[in-house]
């Protein structure tokens, strides 16, 4: 008697996973460049500081993805008979919680700056012998932090859908939303140039609201997943798979009634079904095995599924 | 919804660019510091007593920073009005728009750095323990008396090296080893034994007055050579 295999991906998906890993490594290197450049030109701007912290936080999902994809192929052990899938959700929850806390901290920080009428000073910087206003350099760096990130995000979304990987999907969504953060920060910096001192702290507060919103959404998602709620798809809608399986089982001529409960388990879906046979119908262990295999074929994520037989009452 | 936000942002940036291209001066002063200086023909300068950068001798303002700001005022075609103040009063003066600039050997790492705007450093000095010609280069610093000015920030570094601070106003007459700036030590032909610290000198202005800040910074940059020559000759 064998437990379900631990390797969840087929050959085609493993190829996509490798692509995802390469893309993620490129993202990490890219974000390091953004973080370094932004640190160098940050000056006194609160919007730049907030964007800089947002970019630092953007490193967490790709790191969690790399960590998760190396752990999820680990075989179940005697003491961890269900495998190590859920560690990704736990890591994800930690990341989401840090996003939430940081967002809240930055929002308060931005509002304090706004309410204390803090005027940011931005002076000149010497580039290759020429003096230019540091604000222009900030805008160039912000554009570097926005446009490539948008492209990376679009690339990652496709891979995330093929692998049903929530971490990669969240990472892609955050990258795609970077344009909003970048544009708000650019408007903030241009505002300082216009002499509107409040534009910087206002932009910073708006950016921190976006971080906070991501944190709340992702924390809720991770907590409810750890609470074994019914599976959701990447877009956050409840999966129709339980209905699909029940419908499939009920259509069998020898089954009178069936119900199914499923939960997310990392990339996979895990669960069980109860079936009640019709009068005079019989089910051998071999037939039950076949039936389970047929159910598993309904979705590749369903690799750990158990059917139990119940008396009619 | 998202595409509406996108369009809105593009419109805002476009309007910004229109506004910017119609501006003669960039960036702007929220409190119109430069405009007021030029209009009133007066620049209000807060002086912190800190020789040789700024001090009051016979009711006259003298010092390295004062000479620089006198020339800057001339460049703007205005007259400086000096206010002798302690550091706290001077900084509050800036924050409350009562002064345009505060000078007196202010370092880039001043505790006021988040409250006021600072220029780029106009001078960088490295501080050493220097040995007089009569003292062997191999003498250990431990328990060695080192001449240093009263209240100097260098005292903590002397203590860190287990040497003994010898407080005096006349550093080079004591014949002890001396803790001072590189320029001064070399002028007295002292041997540079140990680097203690370095300092970037800046001016303080009201936070966020970015047109005034960039005007002052670009003046300091253009006159960097003559400013450095003047500082070096004064420090000797």
Image (cartoon, rainbow, N blue to C red):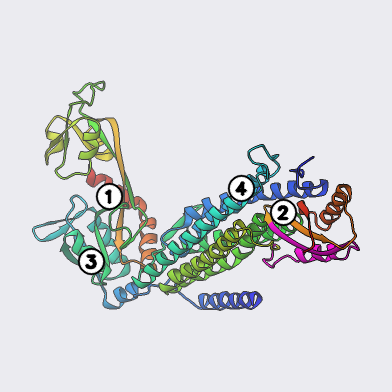
Q: Are marks 2 and 4 on the same chain?
A: yes
Q: CA distance from mark 3 to mark 1?
A: 30 Å
In this view, the mark in front (2 or 1): 2
Q: Which residue is mark 3?
A: B92
Q: Position of residue A270 (x, y in %)?
A: 72, 54
Q: Which residue is mark 2?
A: A270
Q: Is residue A237 magenta?
A: yes
Q: Which residue is mark 1?
A: B230
Residue B20 showing in the rendered view: yes
Q: Are marks 2 and 1 in contact (CB under 8 Å)?
A: no
Q: CA distance from mark 2 to mark 3?
A: 66 Å
Q: Which residue is mark 4?
A: A87
Span of residues in magenta: A234-263
In this view, the mark in front (2 or 3): 2
Q: Position of residue B183 (x, y in %)?
A: 27, 40
Q: Chain of mark 4?
A: A
Q: CA distance from mark 2 to mark 1?
A: 79 Å
**Corner quadrant of residue B133:** top left
Quadrant where the N terminus of chain B sits is: bottom right
């Amino acid at each position: 008697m064998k437990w379900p295999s631990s390797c969840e991906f087929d050959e085609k998906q493993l190829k996509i996973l490798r692509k995802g890993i390469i893309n993620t490594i490129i993202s990490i290197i890219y974000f390091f460049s953004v973080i370094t450049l932004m640190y160098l030109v940050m000056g006194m701007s609160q919007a730049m500081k907030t964007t800089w912290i947002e970019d630092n936080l953007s490193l967490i999902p790709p790191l969690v993805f790399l960590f998760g994809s190396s752990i999820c192929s680990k075989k179940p052990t005697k003491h961890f008979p269900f495998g190590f899938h859920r560690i990704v959700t736990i890591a994800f929850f930690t990341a989401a919680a840090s996003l939430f806390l940081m967002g809240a901290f930055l929002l308060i920080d931005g509002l304090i700056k706004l309410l204390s009428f803090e005027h940011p000073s931005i002076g000149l910087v010497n580039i290759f012998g020429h003096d230019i206003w540091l604000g222009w350099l900030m805008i160039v760096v912000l554009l570097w932090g926005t446009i490539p990130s948008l492209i990376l995000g679009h690339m990652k979304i496709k891979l995330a859908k093929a692998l049903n990987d929530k971490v990669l999907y969240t990472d892609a969504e955050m990258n795609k939303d970077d344009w909003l953060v970048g544009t708000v920060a650019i408007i903030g910096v241009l505002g300082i140039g216009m002499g509107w001192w409040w534009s910087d702290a206002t932009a910073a507060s708006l950016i921190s609201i976006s971080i906070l919103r991501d944190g709340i959404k992702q924390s809720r998602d991770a907590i409810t997943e750890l609470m074994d709620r019914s599976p959701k798809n990447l877009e956050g809608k409840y999966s129709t798979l339980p209905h699909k399986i029940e419908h499939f089982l009920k259509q069998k001529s020898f089954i009178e009634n069936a119900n199914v409960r499923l939960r997310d388990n990392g990339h996979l879906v895990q669960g069980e079904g109860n079936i009640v046979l019709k009068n005079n119908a019989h089910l051998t262990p071999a037939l039950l095995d076949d039936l389970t295999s047929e159910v598993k074929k309904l979705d590749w994520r369903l690799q750990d599924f158990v059917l139990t037989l119940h008396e009619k009452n | 919804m998202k595409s509406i936000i996108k369009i809105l942002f593009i419109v805002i940036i476009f309007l910004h660019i229109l506004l910017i291209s119609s501006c003669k001066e960039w960036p702007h002063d929220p409190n119109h510091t430069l405009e007021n200086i030029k209009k009133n023909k007066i620049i209000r300068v807060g002086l912190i007593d800190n020789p040789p950068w700024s001090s009051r001798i016979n009711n006259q303002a003298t010092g390295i920073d004062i000479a620089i700001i006198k020339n800057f005022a001339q460049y703007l075609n205005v007259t400086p009005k000096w206010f002798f103040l302690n550091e706290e009063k001077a900084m509050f003066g800036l924050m409350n728009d009562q002064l345009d600039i505060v000078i007196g050997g202010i370092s880039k790492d001043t505790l006021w750095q988040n409250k006021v705007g600072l220029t780029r450093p106009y001078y960088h000095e490295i501080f050493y323990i220097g040995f007089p010609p009569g003292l062997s280069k191999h003498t250990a610093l431990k328990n060695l008396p080192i001449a240093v000015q009263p209240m100097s920030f260098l005292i903590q570094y002397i203590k860190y090296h287990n040497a003994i601070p010898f407080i005096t106003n006349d550093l080079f007459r004591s014949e002890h080893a001396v803790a001072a700036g590189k320029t001064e030590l070399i002028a007295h032909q002292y041997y540079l034994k140990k680097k203690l610290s370095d300092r970037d000198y800046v001016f303080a202005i009201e936070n966020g007055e970015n047109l005034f800040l960039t005007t002052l910074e670009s003046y300091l940059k253009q006159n960097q050579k003559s400013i450095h020559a003047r500082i070096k000759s004064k420090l000797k």
